[in-house]
Amino acid sequence: GGYTDKVGDAAVNKKLSFERAKAVAKAITDAGLGKQVTGAEGYGFEFAKYPESAPEVDRVKDRHVSVSVREK
């Protein structure tokens, strides 16, 4: 799942977060683990913890990708 901070347009951030997640999924696939990738999702700033007015040092923490690892 990809995430963004609260700065900017919601639709643009949703797309950006999805592109982040797809990039990580591609890197995992390129590393030969593609069969383990089940999807990629973008959440935009839906789960951002810091307000748009927060300092950059805080907002950067909201810009990330989370990978869920599960046993089959």
Image: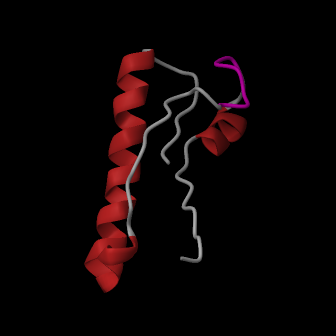
Residue shown at the point (57%, 31%) measured from the top left? 5
Give the image location of residue 4, x and y in percent: 52, 35
Residue 50 colored magenta? yes
Q: Would you identify the image quadrant in which residue 55 lies?
A: top right
- Vertically, is 68 above or below 30? above
Q: Is residue 57 left or right of residue 23?
A: right
Residue 5 colored magenta? no
Closest to the observer, 54 or 5: 5
Q: Is residue 33 left or right of residue 60?
A: left
Closest to the observer, 2 or 5: 2
Residue shown at the point (42%, 15%) measured from the top left? 9
- Vertically, is 52 above or below 68? above
Q: Is residue 68 left or right of residue 39?
A: right
Q: Would you identify the image quadrant in which residue 59 lies?
A: top right
Which residues are the magenta region? 48-53
- Vertically, is 4 above or below 40? above
Residue shown at the point (63%, 39%) measured from the top left? 62
* Extreme residue in the bottom direction: 32
- Identify the main secondary structure in magenta: loop
Give the image location of residue 30, x and y in percent: 26, 77
